[in-house]
Amino acid sequence: MDDYIVGGWSQNLKVVPPKSFSYAMYGMVTNFPSLTTGTAKAPGWSPAKTPAPQYPYCKVLWTYGGAGGVPDRTPSAASEIKAIVDASQVQNWVGVDFDNESMMDIGNIVVTTQHLKNHGKESSYTFLAGWDYNNNHQGVHDVKKIAEHGAADRFILMCYGKSMWSMDDVVANVGPAIEKTIAQGVLPKKVILALTYKGLTRKNLDYFLNQVTSKQIGGLFIWEYPSLSNTDLDYICTKLGID
């Protein structure tokens, strides 16, 4: 069996990732100018001021972006790129997950991933991979541009909304999104499927897992993994051959 990885996101820095995880991502840093969670009027924690949690079995990244990230078209200047890289270096984060739900400046994301790589840091690009991606070409050029420059380590396909899609939508979009991403020059093992615990059933979970294994992509990540049941996590790990 090919090697697969499991990982996911949490908005709680105190949450310890399962020992089966290869990657854990904390955020979401949506107040871009100040690099904090929360809003400008009610900021939360900042990766620039918070040491990365350290686990011997799991790499830890912070997430730049997410729903509600402001403003659009960021990072918008060399100083903002430097702040992202410096935060990762100073506080010992393995790298940055760029969650593009706010019309980011892709050219500057590319530059940032290159700077991170030059400093020995990792990066991932997370994006919505549903109907608009498959049918309206929304975001496809961004994926291609990032892939062409080769600095990003993973491309994470969010194939869910506030909860899991209907099975009809899952069937119509998950496989095509994987294929479209690979067609942009992304190596299959750099492609990661992502789902959410909310609305997860054995039927839709099996479909995602079958897509991972049949297309031999990188693995599966879970949004808000602390809410995932131990039964489902064990099932995922068994199906992917993860101890």
Image (tube, rainbow, N blue to C red):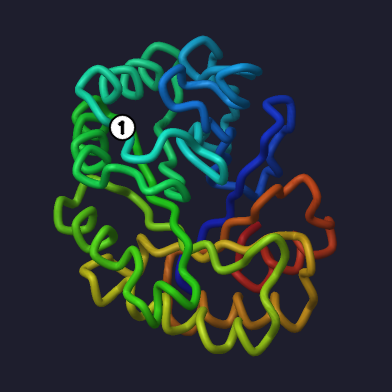
Residue 236 % position (x, y) = 69, 67
Q: Residue at x 70, y 81 (%)?
A: 166
Residue 163 left/right relative to 47: right
Quadrant assignment for the C terminus: bottom right
Q: Residue at x 25, y 17 (%)?
A: 79
Residue 111 left/right relative to 225: left
In the foreground, 105 or 5? 105
Residue placed under numbered mark 1 in the picture: 75
Residue 150 % position (x, y) = 19, 51
The amino acid type, in three-letter code, at marker 1 is Pro
Q: Residue at x 20, y 22 (%)?
A: 78
Residue that protrudes farthest toward the left in the picture = 149
Q: How many marks?
A: 1
Q: Is residue 89 above or below residue 167?
A: above
Quarter residue 156 falls in: bottom left
Residue 134 left/right relative to 117: right
In the foreground, 195 or 238? 195
Q: Which residue is drawn at 21% across and 30% down?
A: 115
Q: What element carries label 1?
A: loop
In the foreground, 16 or 48? 48
Q: How crowded is mark 1: few (under 14 residues within 10 Å), some or many (20 or more)?
A: many
Residue 42 left/right relative to 140: right
Q: In this view, does 69 lie above or below 4?
A: above
Q: In this view, does 212 lie above or below 30?
A: below
Residue 169 % position (x, y) = 60, 84
Residue 53 % position (x, y) = 59, 23
